[in-house]
Amino acid sequence: MTTRYTDEEWLDIIDQAEKNLPLTPVVYKAPNLGSEAFAKTIDHTLLKLDATKEQVDAICEEARVFNFKSVCVRLKWVDLVVHNLRGSSVEMGCVVGFHEGTQDSAEKATEAKNAVGAGATELDMVMNYELLKQKKYSEVYTDIAAVRDVAPYPIILKVILETSQLSPREIVAGCKIAEAAKADFVKTSTGFNGKGASQENVRLMKKVVGDSMKVKASGGVKTVNDCVVMMEAGAERIGASSGVAIMEEARSPHKQVTREAGIVGVEGY
Ligand SMILES: O=C[C@H](O)COP(=O)(O)O
């Protein structure tokens, strides 16, 4: 695996990206509440280490009922999820390097390869954010590229930055490196370390990647309002262990959404 740029070259790229950040935030449009498009933004997630077969079966059933975008689990459950989702339009997502992100690149690549071999169509890998914090940008790139290498498109590759552990500049750096490594999404959080997704971080990530990548908000997204705030900041995917509660709330009659501007809108705003 060759490095794409030296750490010094990465510094220039990050400086430029910071300088060129758009000043005015865009408000993106969320799909109609409770619609099929809304459900198809949600990755229905079960990532705790002590998850049971019964719980995995249950989230697959829920994903079929609500027609979520994907079910997202650890590698040990991929076979079962693939089996359970057969014949549905729900994608099979697997995490890689979860949740620390500090595993060797070879270990991450093997995990990714095994997940794809078992039928995963989407991978959510944790960036080595410890290396990023040490400004070892070239190694961070190589780590992501090692996974992309064994899981080329059309496998969807999402890179989890763990934004709660990063400064805004480090978030910019993580986005630029994930973009260069040809990932499809940058994702905020694992949900297992610090604060989860925030509106500010999603907005910053979207400003950095523009149309070249998508943004996934995850960690602590538990209500319809949380989803709408993230989507309006630029998230096109939500990772949540609360997908069922979110959909039930979204489909409840006279649903009101609290947005930045106050209480506005009902279904279909
Ligand atoms: O994307 C995955 C996260 O682990 C979900 O976190 P959550 O349990 O706060 O929804």
Image (cartoon, rainbow, N blue to C red):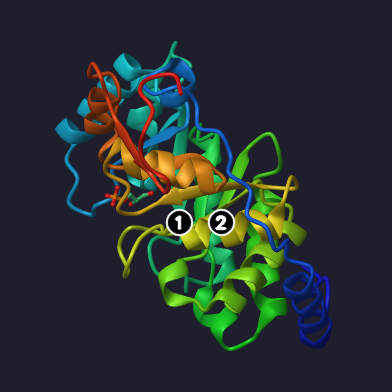
Q: Quadrant of residue 73?
A: top left
Q: Nearest the camera: 105 or 187?
A: 187
At label 1, counting other C-alpha atoms closer than 10 Å, the crowd grade (few under 14, some 14-19, many 20 or more) is some
Q: Which mark is residue 19?
A: none
Q: Position of residue 53 (x, y in %)?
A: 19, 35
Residue 68's place in the image compared with 232, above or below, is above
Percent x, y of residue 118: 48, 35
**In the figure, residue 137 lies in which quadrant?**
bottom right
Q: Quadrant of residue 36?
A: top left
**Quick one: 252 or 106, which is closer to the camera?**
252
Q: Amino acid at mark 1?
A: Gln
Q: Do labels 1 and 2 touch, CB within 8 Å?
A: yes
Q: Which residue is mark 2?
A: 203
User: What's the residue at 74%, 52% (across, down)?
Assistant: 182
Estimate the x, y position of residue 219 in percent, counting from the top left: 34, 54
The residue depicted at 27 percent of the width and 44 percent of the height is 222
Residue at numbered disc 1: 199
Residue 199, compared with residue 194, is above or below; it is above
Quarter of the picture holding the N terminus: bottom right
Q: Residue at x 46, y 38 (%)?
A: 93
* SS at circle 1: helix
